[in-house]
Amino acid sequence: MTSLLRLLLCMTTLLPVSVGQEAAQNASVHHEENADAQKGLGAGDSHVRIVRLSNARGQVGLDRGRGRGVEVAMRNMPVVEGLKLLTADGYAEVEFDDTSRLRLTPSTSVRFPRLVLRSTGAQSSAIRLDVGTIYVNLQDTKNNDFTLIVGSRKITVNRSTHLRLSFFDSAAELAVFSGSAVVQSNAAPVVVAKKQTLVMDALGSGPGQLENNLKEGTYDDWEENVMKYHEHHPRRAAGGRWDYF
């Protein structure tokens, strides 16, 4: 059995909920994101970005949206606008231009509806979480904007922020380790600050429940170990060393 076939079988087994979730989210949402990405391009803006799959372990796949379906993902592959990245029993890390990072835990699927370089040099990124758990660690880079999308919610992540976002069925949980994020909804925006957790219905319109504590996640210990590796061995991590996974 080829590694690609094993990957597809693992995706089918480990990500069954994603099909139902994507149907529930309404296909018009994805069409709207593509339209927003095109409208968001101003004079001098481009898609010239340096975003890569900096690490991958286990069953990790990607779909480039070219009708070829899921391919086996390998370290240092470029990540471009419109790409879908999935993990079955694996882990993956995406590194952005300024060394901000997005990490995927097992049974997770994300899309990249916007990866734009503004004429000013600022970077504009949007990532949709379809299912699973991700960690985001943003650098203190001025003028960049970084948005997470989960269900019908958009989350503006402020610079120098470290957070976890999970999405299963319609339930989403946003936990902020440091920094802050703003969750948009039909109600007033909700600011989630350091060591706070927001539990919400990602497909609903209510503000959710904000808790003044950091709820523990299944992969928090793994994330802490990866963060420590990056802190103590920045050159090895930046050079594509995979042993910190």
Image (cartoon, helix red, strand yellow):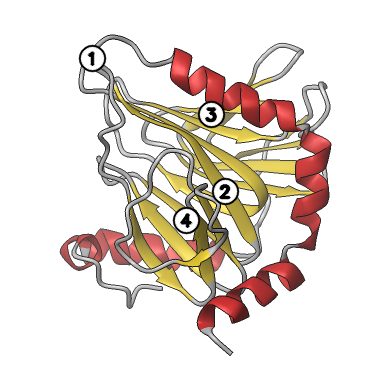
Between 37 and 169, the one nearer to me in the picture: 37
Earlier residue among tags 2 and 1: 1
Distance, label 3 to label 1, CA atoms, is 29 Å
Residue at image coords 33%, 59%: 77
Q: Is residue 82 visible?
A: yes
Q: CA distance from mark 4 to mark 1?
A: 30 Å
Q: Quadrant of residue 74?
A: bottom left
Question: In the figure, is residue 74 to the left or right of 14?
Answer: left
Whether pointer 4 and pointer 3 mark residues with C-beta atoms closer than 8 Å, the reply is: no
Q: Is residue 190 above or below residue 134?
A: above
Residue 58 drawn above or below residue 12 = below
Q: Which mark is residue 44?
A: 1
User: Looking at the image, do the residues carrying marks 3 and 1 touch, with CB atoms under 8 Å apart?
Assistant: no
- Whole-angstrom CA distance, mark 2 to mark 4, is 10 Å
> Which part of the image, by quadrant, shows the N terminus?
bottom right
Disc 4, disc 1: CB below 8 Å?
no
Q: Residue lying furthest bottom in this view?
A: 1
State yes or no: discs 2 and 3 in contact (Cβ < 8 Å): no
The residue where tag 4 is placed is 103
Q: Amino acid at mark 3?
A: Ala
Residue annotated with mark 2: 110
Residue denoted by label 3: 181
Q: Residue at x 54, y 74 (%)?
A: 59
Residue 38: give x, y in percent of width and height. Answer: 45, 19
The tag earlier along the polypeptide, 4 or 3, is 4
Tell me the SS state at disc 4: strand
